[in-house]
Image: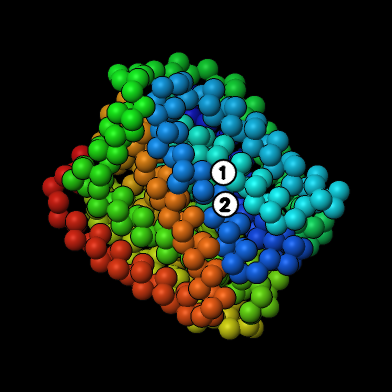
Amino acid sequence: MIDQPGFARFWAADTVSLVGTYVTTLALQVLAVVHLNASATELGVLGAARWVPYLVFGLFAGVLVDRWRRRPLLVGTDLARAVVLGLIPSLGMAGLLDMPTLVVLVTVFGALSLIYDAAHQSFLPQLVPTALLTTANARMEQTRAVAQSAGPMLAGWLVKVVGAPVAIVVDAVSYLVSGLVLATLRTQERFEPAESRDLRREVREGLSWVYRHPTLSPLTVTSHVWFLCTGMVSTVSTFFVLDELGFDAVALGTTYALGGVGGLLGASLSDRAGRLLGVAPVLVIGRWLTPVAYALIPMATNGTTGLVLLCAAQFLFGFSLGLDGPVEMGYRQTVTPERLLGRANATMRSLNRGMIVIGAPLGGALADALGNRTVLWIAVVGLVGQAIAFSRTLNRPQWKV
């Protein structure tokens, strides 16, 4: 139990917005494929659009977060995201929504999310003591898993009943509620601004901390490969399930929901696993579970057996995220000084998401040229490679904090 002032509200706001996020994740894909007749390449471009700002502006967002107080940034970006998402159903109902417009709106949404994410990951240490960071991250990962279960199923139902554009209204409302809840936080924020006001120097300092650290460096580099490959899978698997196998939005939502169930189980075990096994072994297990999970997707066919394989793949993938995510985040927040948290988090998160900018359209283009199953197997091989590389860091003494 975490009895810290402000954490409960922070947790509640995160939960509300996450449910809406998972609704939009599925609704946008269905909107593009079914309503706007997107090809696999176009779906890849849409998948990359949200993460382009992370690649282009991510390092500067870290400097911004380290210069300013984080709560106002969280509130402001939540409210702005509500407005941006609200434009999608409005344009859809007016008959003015097309793929270029959707890509632009998703890109703007991504820029706001970039700032929010950097501030969000850096604000949690303000609310709980260092000893409880892994536990707090595990609690938040549990609600993320629940949201991942409820969101896609809700999305599948909403898409079927009212259509994908209107389903996105749910996410817009969730960000509005989240921003209002965060605005009520009364936690006295410790603010330790960066010593330098030289933008390039501040960026270099964040990069140096991440890429020269004995354990954060291999963690980050292999994460780049992980995100590149999962970005390919996220694009191709959606097109594979909806177009090639012929399943509908409800079936796709069900597979994502099973991923949430797996995430909930993994997050429930994460804190205990980290204390029992240590940080590095838990992260290694998570890195190996991803290729095992995703190897099930290209084995699927249409029909019940195929759906079971797809559900199992998402369940195992969700379990891996739930298991290693809180441990990784707690470790990063523990070893990084307060004044560098914004830049360190933004560096790792932004360049990881930047890999999605490459992986998502790459996966779509390769799928159009080589076929969905071939590209899925290519991504699995890449995930095996990153797992082997990361496993070599297992015995480094710096993992112990």
Q: Residue 280: where, in percent of width, then height?
A: 24, 53
Instruction: Tell me where residue 182 appears, x and y as whole percent.
Output: 58, 27
Does residue 113 lie above or below 263 as drawn? above
Q: Amino acid at mark 2?
A: Ala
Residue 83 appears left or right of 69: right
Q: Quadrant of residue 383?
A: bottom left
Badge 2 is on which residue? Answer: 49
Task: Identify the image quadrant of the N terminus.
Answer: top left
Q: Which image quadrant: the C terminus?
A: top left
The location of residue 333, given as percent across then percent down, is: 33, 36
Classify residue 379 as left or right of residue 305: left
Task: Name the secondary structure under disc 2.
Answer: helix
- Residue 347 in view: yes
Of 183 and 344, nearer the camera is 344
Residue shown at the point (66%, 45%) measured from the top left: 105
Q: Is residue 334 above or below residue 92?
A: above
Q: Residue at x 50, y 34 (%)?
A: 115
Q: Amino acid at mark 1?
A: Gly
Specify whether 199 is left or right of 312.
left
Q: Earlier in the sequence, mark 1 or mark 2?
A: 2
**Image height check: is 194 above or below 112?**
above
x then y, percent, for residue 89: 78, 47
C-alpha separation, residue under disc 1 versus residue under disc 2: 7 Å
Query: In what element is the residue under mark 1?
Result: helix
Circle 1: is it few (<14), some (14-19), or many (20+) Cα within 10 Å? Answer: many
Q: Residue at x 15, y 55 (%)?
A: 395
Q: Which residue is mark 1?
A: 110
